[in-house]
Image (spheres, rainbow, N blue to C red):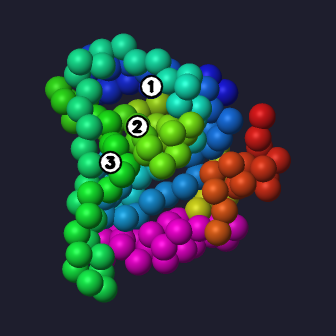
Amino acid sequence: MHLKGSCHCGRVHFSLESAQPYPFNLCYCSICRKTAGGGGYAINLGGDYRTLKVEGMEHVKVYQATITDADTGEQRLSSGQRHFCVECGSALWLWDPNWPELVHPLASAIDTPLPVPPERTHLMLGSKAPWVKVQAAPNDKLFEVYPDESLAEWHQRLGLSS
């Protein structure tokens, strides 16, 4: 599926190809929640990084979160690069050099009508804010940390891959 997205102020426009366009993965971790999740979570899609085209890149900055190990207190810089518009603050996409072929646009930045997922995955529930009530449907999957399947595997299992 060809996806088009933009920031709120319109200075950044981007497009990419996605074999995983269903917005099903709700992430409640503190990084997603605080950088892109007004409802207490954020939703990333999967895309082919080689197809990412950006207009207005001069308005894009990158944020790399500091992650603290819960057991040791040791801090490290996340390899995930969260791209956002420096003018309006819109979260746009995440790219990680550990998986250079992938890009993860935020569903909230996509202008193309997205398909409605038949079920959803709620992940990182162990990090969710106490005020957030999880709105899980009967077929939704819930995980304290990470799910047991990738974006691609979820789409394949449900016969939604192109």
Task: State which quarter of the image contains the N terminus.
Answer: top right
Disc 3 packing (10 Å; few <14; some 14–19; many ≥20): many
Residue carrying label 3: 36
Segment colored magenta: 122-147
Q: Report whether residue 76 is seen.
A: yes
Mark toward the start of the polypeptide (1 vs 2): 1
Q: Quadrant of residue 133?
A: bottom left
**Residue nearest the observer in this picture, 52 or 97:** 97
**Residue 49 location (% of width, % of height):** 53, 31
In the displayed structure, would residue 150 be above or below residue 1?
A: below
SS label for mark 1: strand
The residues tagged by marks 3 and 1 sit, at their Cα atoms, a distance apart of 15 Å
**Would you say 91 lies left or right of 58 here?**
right
**139 inside magenta stretch:** yes
Q: Are marks 2 and 3 in contact (CB under 8 Å)?
A: no
**Residue nearest the observer in this picture, 9 or 92:** 92
**Identity of the amino acid at label 1?**
Gly
